[in-house]
Amino acid sequence: DVKVTQSSRYLVKRTGEKVFLECVQDMDHENMFWYRQDPGLGLRLIYFSYDVKMKEKGDIPEGYSVSREKKERFSLILESASTNQTSMYLCASPPRDRVSHEQYFGPGTRLTVT
Amino acid sequence: GENVEQHPSTLSVQEGDSAVIKCTYSDSASNYFPWYKQELGKGPQLIIDIRSNVGEKKDQRIAVTLNKTAKHFSLHITETQPEDSAVYFCAASIRASGGSNYKLTFGKGTLLTVNP
């Protein structure tokens, strides 16, 4: 079974804090994605990575950065958390076979910024 | 970039009835269209997908149809059951950078409630 795990299910941080969200996949996948999910807005792509040390901006990268130092781990960084970054964050990874674009999602991290 | 519209945003049906969710997309280069089901407290899970060279695909009570000319695709669930209650997302896949990588653009989701 493909497994995508996220370090925390729930996280509460204060405005201005630096926040790290971690995602790990155990299937030697090359591509990894970070989304945020908000009611009525669906899933929106923040950043993705198609190889170690490679990253691409998604549709809403402002206020976020990412790090991919090892193939299995993709970190989302909020340099200075703000209340409008309160959201559900989902990590996903598709299989190695790029013909199949399906993505396997982690369980999500619900982040609250106070 | 790609834009995916999904309707309706909420759908309530009686157990045993059919449910239909519709999506349209804007980029004619999109060639893969998955549907995801998200239950409360979980990440989305792929339930069915269709590629652009196919018009229809069925898996037990779930089917997806694709009209490439009109750029729309639909999810059909027959004989609905209470456990079908969830949020459903459609998506369209387009090439990202580098030519060999893909990314998904998602619709805003449909909350399906199946009443016993």
Image (cartoon, helix red, strand yellow):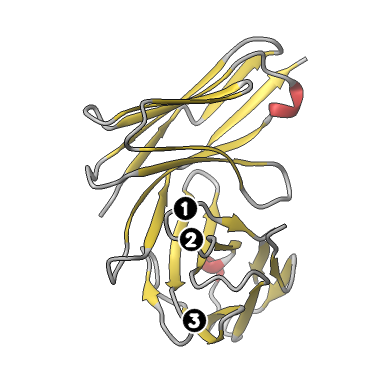
Name the residue carrying label 3.
Answer: A66
Instruction: Pinpoint residue B38: horizontal percent, then vertical percent.
Output: 64, 43
Task: Say which residue appears at 32% left-offset and 35% top-offset.
Answer: B53
As drawn, is A110 to the left or to the right of B94?
A: right
Residue A66 place in picture, x, y as percent: 49, 81
- Where's residue A52, x and y in %? 48, 84
- What whole-number distance in Å separates the C-alpha atoms at marks 3 and 2? 24 Å
| Label 3 Cα crowd, 10 Å radius (few <14 / some 14-19 / many 20+) | many
Q: Which residue is mark 1?
A: A100
Above or below for A86 versus A63:
above
Q: Residue at x 61, y 27 (%)?
A: B112
* Label number found at residue B108: none
Answer above or below: position of A59 versus A11: above
Is the C-beta separation of discs 1 and 2 under 8 Å? yes
The chain that hosts pointer 3 is: A
Marks 1/3 in contact by CB < 8 Å: the verdict is: no
Same subunit, tags 1 and 2: yes
Residue of label 2: A97
Figure check: B45 above or below B14: below
Compare marks 1 and 3 and give the one earlier in the sequence. Answer: 3
Task: Give SS at disc 2.
Answer: loop
